[in-house]
Image (cartoon, helix red, strand yellow):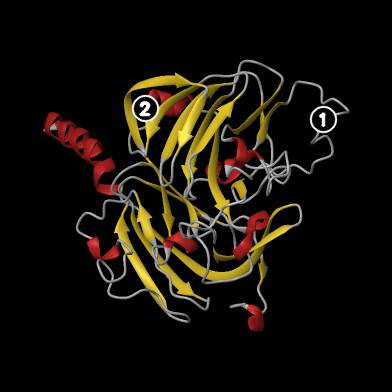
């Protein structure tokens, strides 16, 4: 009898993870009209999830059941596509009006999305109405990180995470909702996480850190992200782990693409990472600008002539702190924009 009870207990213990794994995650998102300052002297009207660009981090686990209540507080129609979620048995939640969703979310209306986080990786969410404007130049994008049920040894080795979402902006239509993003329109500002250098932030590390960077192509141009002083091990593409990771010093990130890279921080100093598309290193033609950052080793003395010597440091600019806080939806106050005045919304 004792043997039977013991075997039953062993079987029950083995089944518990499968029986208890799926968590119910429920979140609220609004879509708001705000203005953000992308670069010195350049502000842009955006459609912002929860009033911020980039949008809040959504962090869940593979197999979780996710519910998101979305309210549209803007003057134009929107929807949300959960980019990378395969929507198994939930295709009506894919966020494409007239195809998988009967209608877009009109001003003042709400819609609830329900789906299972059916695959892990670096996923994201963005509008699927007038994407050429709303996504390419109005900031309607945010990270959706789905952790695997069974993390690999490589996953377990990571000591610091960073999310980098590259995008483009068109100053000609910065203050005109309903315009921009068309083939003849020209992007002249380029950013990471909604900011162009010098408004970006450093990545602070210490020798021995294992850094994972998740690159996202959130705009409509390809970015060639080049890191000085270190090699990057590309370990995942579009959320899928690679069977044969490979080393690079430049990662090409096209629209909609995601690349996960692992970097062993073993070369103390101050090293830049920048976009190797030359025009992307300008703010409307003025050098230096664009999606540039610096890796600052904390045990290396900061020189008096260093460009960011007096910078106020935001440790969560790359979502590093939010990713440490477990699972949920994480807003970030520094990403919040200023509300657009009611009478000036469509101008």
Quadrant position of residue 115: bottom left
Q: Is residue 64 above or below residue 251?
A: below
Per the image, the residue denoted by label 1 is: 306
On screen, residue 7 versus residue 272, left or right, reads left
The Cα atoms of the two marked residues, 2 and 1, are separated by 38 Å
Q: Which mark is residue 155?
A: none
Whether residue 50 appears in this view of the structure is no
Q: Is residue 14 above or below residue 112?
A: above
Name the outermost residue toward the right. Answer: 304
Q: Which mark is residue 152?
A: 2
Q: Is residue 99 above or below residue 299?
A: below
Measured as percent of width and height from the top left, residue 280 is found at 60, 41
Q: State the SS at label 1.
A: loop
Name the residue located 33 percent from the left edge and 64 percent from the top edge: 95
Name the residue located 67 percent from the left edge and 78 percent from the top edge: 341
**Nearer the N terminus, badge 2 or badge 1?**
2
Q: Quadrant of the N terminus?
A: top left
On screen, residue 131 versus residue 325, left or right, reads left
Quadrant position of residue 43: bottom right
Measured as percent of width and height from the top left, residue 89 is found at 19, 58
**Number of numbered discs visible in the structure rendering:** 2
- Give whichever of 121, 107 is nearer the camera: 107
- In front: label 2 or label 1: 1
Q: Crowding at label 2, few (<14), some or many (≥20) Cα neighbours within 10 Å?
A: few
- Give whichever of 316, 174 is nearer the camera: 174
Q: Is residue 269 above or below residue 3?
A: above
């Amino acid at each position: 009898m004792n043997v039977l009870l013991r075997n039953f207990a062993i079987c029950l213990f083995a089944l518990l993870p499968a029986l208890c794994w799926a968590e119910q995650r429920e979140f609220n998102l609004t879509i708001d009209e705000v203005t953000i300052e992308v670069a010195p002297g350049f502000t842009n009207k955006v459609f912002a999830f929860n009033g911020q660009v980039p949008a809040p981090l959504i962090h869940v686990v593979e197999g979780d059941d996710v519910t998101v209540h979305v309210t549209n507080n803007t003057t134009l129609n929107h929807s949300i596509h959960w980019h990378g979620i395969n929507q198994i048995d939930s295709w009506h939640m894919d966020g494409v009006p007239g195809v998988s969703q009967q209608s877009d979310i009109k001003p003042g209306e709400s819609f609830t999305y329900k789906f299972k986080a059916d695959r892990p990786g670096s996923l994201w969410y963005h509008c699927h109405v007038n994407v050429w404007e709303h996504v390419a130049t109005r900031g309607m994008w945010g990270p959706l990180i789905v952790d695997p049920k069974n993390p690999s040894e490589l996953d377990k080795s990571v000591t610091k995470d960073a999310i980098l979402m590259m995008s483009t902006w068109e100053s000609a239509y910065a203050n005109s909702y309903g315009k921009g993003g068309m083939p003849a329109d020209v992007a002249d500002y380029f950013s990471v996480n909604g900011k162009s250098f010098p408004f970006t932030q450093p990545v602070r590390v210490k020798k021995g850190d294992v850094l994972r960077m998740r690159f996202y192509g959130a705009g409509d141009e390809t970015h060639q992200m080049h890191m000085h002083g270190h090699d990057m091990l590309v370990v995942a593409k579009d959320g899928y782990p690679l069977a044969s990771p490979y080393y690079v010093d430049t990662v090409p990130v096209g629209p909609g693409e995601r690349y996960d890279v692992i970097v062993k921080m073993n070369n103390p100093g101050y090293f830049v990472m920048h976009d190797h598309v030359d025009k992307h290193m300008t703010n409307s033609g003025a050098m230096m600008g664009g999606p540039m950052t610096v890796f600052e080793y904390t045990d290396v003395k900061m020189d008096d002539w260093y460009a960011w010597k007096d910078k106020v440091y935001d440790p969560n600019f790359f979502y590093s702190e939010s990713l440490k806080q477990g699972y949920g939806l994480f807003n970030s106050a520094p990403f919040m924009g200023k509300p657009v005045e009611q009478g000036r919304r469509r101008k």
